[in-house]
Amino acid sequence: MDIGAYYYEIAEFINLIQSGRQESTINSLENSLITMEIMDEIRRQTGVVLPADNKIID
């Protein structure tokens, strides 16, 4: 894994922690939820099933 590929994400997490904020202005919770809904629909339509999809979470 190339940790450098995550530089901006890591920097944003550090910034959030240091500033005491709980939500990024770069990538809001709403934007993340919309993205996940789109990805879930793509997976549903294409029949993609990941190993974790079948695991029971306690």
Image (tube, helix red, strand yellow):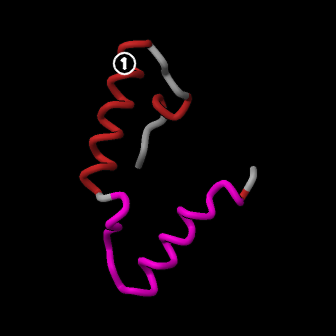
Q: Main secondary structure of the magenta part?
A: helix
Task: Return the x and y of residue 3 as percentages of the image width and height.
Answer: 71, 59
The answer to which image quadrant residue 44 occupies is top left
Q: Which residue is drawn at 52% across and 34% down?
A: 52
In the image, residue 2 lies in the stretch drawn in magenta: no
Residue 3, above or below 58? below
Q: Residue at x 48, y 35 (%)?
A: 55
Horizontal placement of 55 versus 22: left or right?
Answer: right
Residue nearer the viewer, 25 or 48: 25
Label 1 secondary element: helix
Residue nearer the viewer, 52 or 2: 2
Three-letter code for the amino acid on which mark 1 is drawn = Arg
Residue nearer the viewer, 31 or 58: 31
Task: Return the x and y of residue 49 as percentages of the image width and height.
Answer: 49, 21
Q: How crowded is mark 1: few (under 14 residues within 10 Å), some or many (20 or more)?
A: few
Horizontal placement of 5 versus 53: left or right?
Answer: right
The residues colored magenta run 4-27
Residue at the farthest top position? 46
Residue at the farthest left position? 30
Horizontal placement of 11 versus 3: left or right?
Answer: left
Task: Return the x and y of residue 29 as percentages of the image width and height.
Answer: 29, 57
Residue 37, above or below 49? below
Task: Return the x and y of residue 51 as percentages of the image width and height.
Answer: 56, 29
Q: Residue at x 48, y 71 (%)?
A: 13
Residue 17, above or below 39? below
Horizontal placement of 9 versus 42: left or right?
Answer: right
In the image, residue 10 lies in the stretch drawn in magenta: yes
Q: Check disc 1 and report the residue beneath it.
A: 44
